[in-house]
Image (cartoon, rainbow, N blue to C red):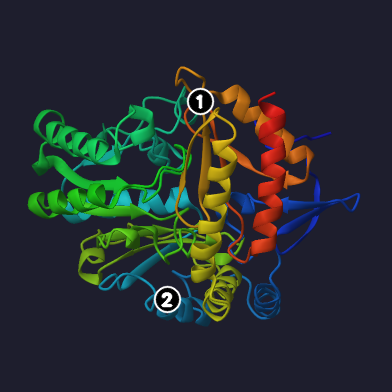
Amino acid sequence: MATLSPLLQQATPVLADRGEGVHLIDEDGRRWLDFTAGIGVTSTGHCHPKVVAAAQRQVATLIHGQYTTVMHRPLLRLTERLGEVLPEGLDALFYVNSGSEAVEAAVRLARHATARQNIVVFQGSFHGRTMGAAALTTAGTKFRTGIGPLMPGVAVAPFPYAYHYGWSEDEAVRFALRELDHLLATVSHPDDTAAFVVEPVLGEGGYVPAPPGFLEGLRERADRHGVLLVMDEVQTGFGRTGRFWGHEHSGVRPDVVVTAKGLASGFPLSAIAAPAALMERGRPGSQGGTYGGNAVACAAALATLEVIEEEGLVANAAEMGARLHDGLRKVAADHPRVGDVRGLGLMQASEFSTPDGEPDPGTARRAHAAAVERGLLLLTCGAYGQVVRMIPPLIVTGEQIDEALSIWSEAVTAATR
């Protein structure tokens, strides 16, 4: 009898039977408020009727049209539609299946286009688990340990994680940019540096938003040195932060955007976007793949974009995110073990700390478990597992936010007794 790998560890004990909007329902009929959204994937909620209908129609006509062999209309329509929401000038797209694949495609393009080999990433980053993406990932040693040697040519600079350093945001930004300059002077000369790869909000690293001043500093240095600025929007894109793209909070223009997760409401689809003139500098044959741009996934992505626009989900993410953030801060005010509350839009986190300011993963785990017991599904993150994150679907209502906050308050109280 075959079983799943023992290395796969569930964050919750739920055996899901079906999903409806913001809820998962188990085989016993119990409803769970899902503030994980499949790690930010079910942006339009579970089984949104428009997404379901679009996928069903496509399954009945063409499931797989391998896009380096034949072309299909859903892919062409999606490319046209994404052109309406991507940053100006990023007018060429390459599709794959996962965030890791898309990140590696962006690295390949950056190295080809610049004829430089080094990639600079930032402490706490998560860019995937495949061999190249794992080399870019510093959110925790579990993603890297025991598989070396990793891909060479990666340099790591500090991220302005103000709470971790015990500084103000401005102090953390000044430090991070100063250390980046030092890295370019001591580790990776600008002439050897192809790209800066950064998340607008650290994901697995603890849900830490990149301050606008930091991204502005990266853009200035990228322009000065001829380095490409790659925004990993795998988790932050498609309205998650209350703007369509997470980097829009800074006004900074990236050279390459990486997108996945919420792109197709649960169907596997990812992409990189870049100016056509930049994409043309990749080497012939360097882009391809069997399943990339799958017809059913593209149909679901088109429906996802329609739902986001028609239901005003980007604005809803901003409004509900502010409501969630304010509620989390009120809970934190009554529980000193919650040392920090932060996030953008519907990407919010509570970081637990001991009285002497050290990471407190034990209390975070207890709060997480207590929330699950009470019907609220959450996830942890951070290098030590000391952060509990909330990622509800973009369709979440004020009533559902308030219900989650009530459960969270009880869970934190139970965890800190």
* Callouts 2 and 1 close, C-beta under 8 Å: no
Q: Is residue 50 left or right of residue 82?
A: right
Query: Residue at 49% of width from left, 70% of height from top?
Result: 315
Query: Residue at 36% of width from left, 71% of height from top?
Result: 86
Quadrant holding the N terminus: top right
Asked if residue 126 is positioned above or below residue 216 in the image, the reply reads above
Query: Badge 2 local density, few (<14 within 10 Å), some, or many (20+)?
Result: many
Query: Residue at 29% of width from left, 53% of height from top?
Result: 230
Q: Please give the residue where the numbered disc 1 appears in the rendered image.
A: 353
Residue found at the very far top of the displayed protein: 356
Query: Badge 1 local density, few (<14 within 10 Å), some, or many (20+)?
Result: many
Rendered location of residue 284, percent (x, y): 28, 62
Query: Residue at 48% of width from left, 39% of height from top?
Result: 204
Quadrant holding the C terminus: top right
Query: Amino acid under label 1?
Result: Ser
Camera-side residue of 257 and 321: 321
Rendered location of residue 332, percent (x, y): 55, 37
Asked whether residue 35 appears in the rendered view, the answer is yes
Query: Amino acid under label 2?
Result: Thr
Residue 219 falls in image quadrant = bottom left
Spatial CA span between label 2 and label 1? 45 Å
Q: Is residue 87 left or right of residue 317?
A: left
Camera-side residue of 245 and 173: 173
Rendered location of residue 60, percent (x, y): 71, 79
Q: Please give the residue where the numbered disc 2 appears in the rendered image.
A: 79
